Amino acid sequence: MNTEFISQIQNGSPLAVARAITAVERGGAPARELCRALFPHTGRAHIIGVTGAPGTGKSTLVNALAKEFRAREKRVAILAIDPSSPFSGGAILGDRLRMQDLTGTGVYIRSMASRGQLGGLAAAVADALVILDAAQFEIILVETVGAGQSEVDIAKHALTTLVIEAPGLGDEIQAIKAGILEIADVLVVNKADRDGANAAVAALQMNLNLNPNKHAWRPPILKTIAPTSEGVSQVVDAIYKHTAYLDEHGLRAQKERARFDDGLRALAQREWLEQKMHALPPGQWDAWLAQITQRQRDPYSIAQEVLAS
Amino acid sequence: MNTEFISQIQNGSPLAVARAITAVERGGAPARELCRALFPHTGRAHIIGVTGAPGTGKSTLVNALAKEFRAREKRVAILAIDPSSPFSGGAILGDRLRMQDLTGTGVYIRSMASRGQLGGLAAAVADALVILDAAQFEIILVETVGAGQSEVDIAKHALTTLVIEAPGLGDEIQAIKAGILEIADVLVVNKADRDGANAAVAALQMNLNLNPNKHAWRPPILKTIAPTSEGVSQVVDAIYKHTAYLDEHGLRAQKERARFDDGLRALAQREWLEQKMHALPPGQWDAWLAQITQRQRDPYSIAQEVLAS
C-alpha cells in the first residue's frame, strides 16, 4: 500500500479522499487493501443518517445541518447516496447546485450511486465511511433518497438517524411512515412554513404513540425551514441529546456492534462468492443457469452444489 | 414434503398460497424444501414489475391493471412489496382498502415487508414468485414503493417493468428519473387529468432521447387515470407488445438467465453463511466483533479468516 496516499487521506486531503472513494466504488483488491490500512484509524466520526421521501427538501436541510456543524467548528462531510441511479449517475446536476451552496464552507461533499459496484451499494457505502472516518471528519452526514430497503440498510451504519417529513406529500407517504419511523432517532418536519405543518407534527406524534420505541428513547419532532436555517440549530442540539442518551445507557457500543455484525456478514459473503466464482471450471456457472432456465434442475439444489464444489 | 399441500398450491388454493408465502417469509429449511418442490412447475407466469415514487397513484393503477387482465381472462396475482416497513408491516390499512376494491374480481393479492426475513427481502420475493408461478397465476404484478436499490433488484425478476410517474411531484422526483428510466419497458403518466400531464410526458420523451435504450426497444409513454381505468387497456396492450418484441429478438431467455444469475448468487451466499455460522465455535463470532469495534483488527482480514475457518 502507498503510505504517502494513506497519510494524505488521514490528513483529510479532498483530492486523496475523492480518489479513495472512487477506488471503493470500483471494489476489488485495491479497495480492500485501502480500507484495511485505514480501518485502525477509524472510530471517531459521528455518522448521522438522514432519510426521507422525495420532495421533503432533504438535500437543502442536509446542507443547512452541515453549515450549522461547521459553525460549531466540526469537520463535516456529506455522503449523498443515490440508489435510484444505478446506471447513469443521474444526480450530477443536483450535486453541482449543492456544491455551489457549500462553496467556501469547508464541507466535503460526495455522491455515490450503485453503478458499477461489485457487492452492491451497501458495501461501497461501508467502505466510504471507513475512508471519511479515517480522514478525520468528525461529522459524516449520510443522505439517502426515498424510503426503501437501502435506507434501512444504511441507517444501520449511523449512530443517529434523522427522518425528514414535509407537509402535504399525499396519503401514500402517510402510509409508509410506520416502518420508517422505527429507524428514526430525530424526526424533522421540514418546509414548516407550508400549510399542514402542524398537522404533520400531530400525525407523527400519533404514530409515535401507536409505535412506542422499544429503547425508551422517544424521538423529538422538530420543525425546520431549511433555506433560512430556521430550526436547524435545534436539530443539531437534538442530535447531541440523542448521543448523550446513548452514552448514558451504554447503547453506543451496542449500535456499533450491530453495524459491524451486518458488515462482516456481507463482507464475508462477498469474498466467498468472488473466490468461488474464480475457482469454478470454465462454463460450469453457465451450464447451471441453463439447467435452471430450462427447469431441469432447481436453484436450491444447485446452490448446495456450489457450496460443495 | 407434504404432497397434499404442494398440490393445493399448484391448484391455486388462496389459503395454501398464503401459507406458503408466509413460510418463505420466515425462511429456513421448510421454505427451501417448498420452493424446491415447486420450482419444476414454474416458468409460465408473466412477471410484471410496477414501480414509481410515492404519490403517483401506483396501487390504484395496479388494481386497475389487474382488473383489465381479469377481463382478458387471465389468472392474476398482485405481490405488493413494502420495503419501507421492515419492522411493523405498516401497510395493513392500505391493504384492506385495496382488497375491498378487488373483492369478487378473483385477483389474488398479497403484501410482503422485509420484517423477520433471513436473507433479506429480495430473497423472499424470489421465493414468493416461485410459489405464485407454480400456483398457475398467468400474470403476477409485483408492485414496489418508491425508487431505490430494492426497486432495481426486484425489476430484475420481471419480464416487463412499468415505471409510473404523475404530474407535479416536484423537482427532486425529476432528478431521480434518469436512473429509474433505464429499468422501464413501459412508462405511464398516471393522474393524467391533472395539470402538467403533457409536460410530464414531454419531460419523459426528452429523457428518453438523452438516454437511448441500448436494447433498441423504446419504452412507450402512456397516460392513465387509474380510478376510471382510462388508458389502462392501452397499457396492457403495450405490455404484450413488449413481450412480443422480446420473443422476436430472442431476449426472453436472456432476461430469465440474468434473473437466475443474480438469484443463484444470492442463494448460494445465504446458504454458505448459514452453514458457516452454525459451524463456528461458540463465542467466536462475538469475539471477532469485539476485536473490530475496539479496532484491534479490521473486518477485511477477519472476513478472510471466516472463509478459511
Image: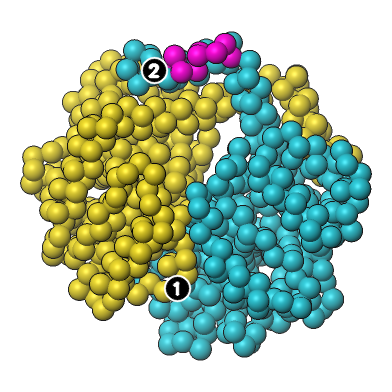
Chain colours: A yellow, B cyan
- Residue occupying the point 25% across, 64% down: A190
Please tell me whether residue A13 belongs to the stretch shown in magenta.
no
A231 displayed left or right of A305: left
B2 displayed left or right of A130: right
* Residue A301 image point, x, y percent: 80, 31
Where B194 falls versus A189 (above or below)?
below
Q: Is residue B146 visible?
A: yes
Three-letter amino acid code of the residue under disc 2: Ala
Q: Quadrant of the N terminus of chain A?
A: top left
Three-letter amino acid code of the residue under disc 1: Asp
Q: Secondary structure at mark 1?
A: helix
CA separation in Å, label 2 and label 1:
44 Å
Residue at numbered disc 2: B290
Residue at numbered disc 1: A171
The foreground one among B238 and A232 is: A232
* Residue B204 image point, x, y percent: 50, 72
- Residue occupying the point 42% across, 74% down: A170
The foreground one among A296 and A18 is: A296
- Residue occupying the point 54% across, 62% down: B91
Query: Range of the magenta residues?
Result: B280-288
- Residue occupying the point 46% across, 18% down: B286
Where A108 falls versus A270 (above or below)?
below
Q: Quadrant of the C terminus of chain A?
A: top right
